[in-house]
Image (cartoon, rainbow, N blue to C red):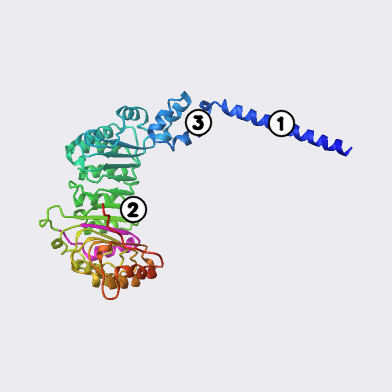
Amino acid sequence: MKRGGRDSDHNSSEEGTAEKSKKLRTTNEQSQTCDWGNLLQDIILHIFKYLPLLDRAHASQVCRNWNQVFHMPDLWRCFEFELNQPATSYLKATHPELIKQIIKRHSNHLQYVSFKVDSSKESAEAACDILSQLVNCSLKTLGLISTARPSFMDLPKSHFISALTVVFVNSKSLSSLKIDDTPVDDPSLKVLVANNSDTLKLLKMSSCPHVSPAGILCVADQCHGLRELALNYHLLSDELLLALSSEKHVRLEHLRIDVVSENPGQTHFHTIQKSSWDAFIRHSPKVNLVMYFFLYEEEFDPFFRYEIPATHLYFGRSVSKDVLGRVGMTCPRLVELVVCANGLRPLDEELIRIAERCKNLSAIGLGECEVSCSAFVEFVKMCGGRLSQLSIMEEVLIPDQKYSLEQIHWEVSKHLGRVWFPDMMPTW
């Protein structure tokens, strides 16, 4: 009886295994004969969102169901037009036939659009032609990006303004606009404000020579929801800062100012009153004030004469010891400092002063400068672990009696609380 029971259990076990194998074979056969064309469109849509445009276009040719998904509005809300001339650019361009299809079938679906153009006038003209046809869309973001030389500036001003006005008039909810290096002007900004004042939150328009301080002031006066602004220094005024500080205006989060010398030695830079800066900071105490300086030494005279609320300073050209010394005295909110070049005079005293007075400094980068190893160690010791970014070329550090280049990395690492090495100049 015992042996019979064991045989019975063994037989039932074999039957169970056979049944499982049969089910497994059935499942495999079903998976091999699965009709991929009848997948739920929501699933296909989710997959398509991860595919590059060209792969998505190829996949749309598989069957009618996939082609229908390819043209769903959700896939066309965000699009970047890449416009390049084969003779002048190695980048791939958006195919002309695809552009025609987008304008014909999806222009009313577009919401987040950017144009990336090369340095040719033809590409900029193509971008304007597309913009002028977007009469049925209501964009939320628009970016005009020149990958090389600002080619939009080569266009007739009227042609560019006409195309841009189409978007401003038809987009009643534009929240982000990036139009650096373009011939936008004051009247077109008035059109922008008239149609999008309640929704505009970000405006970047550095290097727009046809815009006046009055034009940008009009934007600040009407667009009370503006949170990020980028412009050239010549557009900055006391009136603009006071407009951004009004009770109606939301607190600004990011203000970028490019201080650029257009004509070396001939550019006059005006002075912003300390009272205007004070009012601005009282209204927006957490704002990031980012300033890029591309000046020659003799042009720095109007700057850093009294306290300004800069948080990020970038010096793209050589800056004197005197100016850096004034930075330490006038920028107590400084968070990041980058100096590309200084000269052959050590910056020991200037760095120590910055460490003493700039209590929020957490990032610094030094290029063609000189600092003694002892002063650099003292600077790091004073700043301590709050220095999250410390980018110093090895050539900057000058060995002295106290520290050699071999010793300094250990000493700096000790005060930072992490391993640190100076940056090395590539040998290629």
Q: Which residues are magenta?
A: 269-293
Outermost residue on the top side: it is 64
Give the amino acid at mark 3: Gln
- Cα separation between marks 3 and 2: 38 Å
How packed mark 3 is, by other alpha carbons closer than 10 Å (few <14, some 14-19, many 20 or more), is some
Which of the two discs, 1 and 2, labels the residue nearer the N terminus? 1
* Residue closest to the eye, 193 or 411: 411
Give the amino acid at mark 2: Arg
- Cα separation between marks 1 and 3: 35 Å
Give the amino acid at mark 1: Glu
Location of the N terminus by quadrant is top right
Residue highlighted by disc 2: 227
Residue highlighted by disc 3: 41
Quick one: SS at disc 1?
Answer: helix
* Residue closest to the eye, 289 or 403: 403
x then y, percent, for residue 128:
24, 35
Asked if residue 281 is among those painted magenta in the image, a careful observer would answer yes
The residue located at (21%, 43%) in the rendering is 150
Residue 122 seen by the camera: yes
Which of the two discs, 3 and 2, labels the residue nearer the N terminus? 3
Outermost residue on the left side: it is 266
Residue highlighted by disc 1: 19
